[in-house]
Amino acid sequence: MMSAVGDNIQKIREEIAKAALRSGREPSAVRLMAVTKTVDDDRILEAIEAGVDIMGENYIQEAKRKIETMDVTVKWHMIGHLQSNKAKYAVRLFDMVHSVDRMGLAAELDKRSAAAGRVTSILIEVNVSGEESKRGVRSDDAPALVREIARLDNLSIRGLMTMPPWCDDPEDARPYFAALRELRDRIVAEEIPGIGMRELSMGMSGDYRVAVEEGATIVRVGTAIFGARVY
């Protein structure tokens, strides 16, 4: 019998597929990430059994414990704010870092990646809304940051990430998702050497359908999979 977590994942995948088809895309172009902040190991294992193969974590320490004790063959992505002094842990723990928003952090990740003998995949976090409370590089400054980071040998820019302002109506998030896609297309048009820009990490439990319609390739879903968090 499928667990409640498994049921939720099946429903979300169906919704992702419908949204992708509505926008003329293949459902396989969108990957589902389970956001596992504060989620216990058993429920994470249920998500993995239901076929989710990307886990998103917000904090180094929590991620480190899970990655080292759970021994599962999934991808772990860092989606939370990353301080430069934690870069040395991030490059060893994560397959991708979604939250690179400044050159100082990129330079430290590059240095630590070189020391670890690896190339770290990253996304550039963009503050599309311009809200003071949001992290991320301003949209106008993003292309210059991409050009600067592109010169670093041990980082591979794979695309962009954003969080729109919180809103009751998912439709209110649409302009922000569309803006991130348009920014990605502008950066692609610059043909910066070594830049892939395939990924758009956007959309969460409340608005992932809209994000998929606007081009998301990774949706970051926690509550809709695991239920409301208990802190």
Image: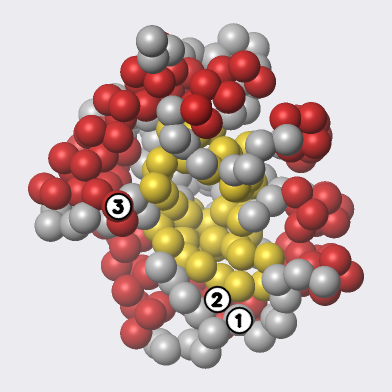
Of 19 and 147, which appears nearest the observer? 19
Q: CA distance from mark 3 to mark 1?
A: 28 Å
Q: Position of residue 118 (x, y in %)?
A: 76, 70
Q: Which residue is mark 2?
A: 146
Q: CA distance from mark 3 to mark 2?
A: 27 Å
| Disc 3 packing (10 Å; few <14; some 14–19; many ≥20) | few
The residue lying at 37 percent from left, 26 percent from top is: 9
Q: CA distance from mark 1 to mark 2?
A: 6 Å
Which of the 4 image quadrants contains residue 122? bottom right
Q: What is the quadrant of the N terminus in the image?
A: top left
The residue lying at 79 percent from left, 54 percent from top is: 92
Q: Is residue 170 above or below residue 86?
A: above
Query: Is disc 1 in contact with disc 2, using a CB cutoff of under 8 Å?
Result: yes
Which of the 4 image quadrants contains residue 207? top left
The earlier-in-sequence mark between 3 and 1 is: 3
Q: Which residue is mark 1?
A: 150
Q: Which residue is mark 3?
A: 28
> Which three-letter amino acid code belongs to the residue tagged 3?
Ser
Rendered image: mark on residue 115: none
The earlier-in-sequence mark between 3 and 2 is: 3
- Classify residue 176 as left or right of residue 133: left
> Which three-letter amino acid code belongs to the residue tagged 1?
Ala
The residue lying at 51 percent from left, 41 percent from top is: 53
Q: Is residue 75 above or below residue 35?
A: below
> Which three-letter amino acid code belongs to the residue tagged 2?
Val
Q: What is the quadrant of the C terminus in the image?
A: top right
Instruction: Classify mark 3: helix, strand or loop.
Output: helix
Q: Position of residue 223 (x, y in %)?
A: 45, 21
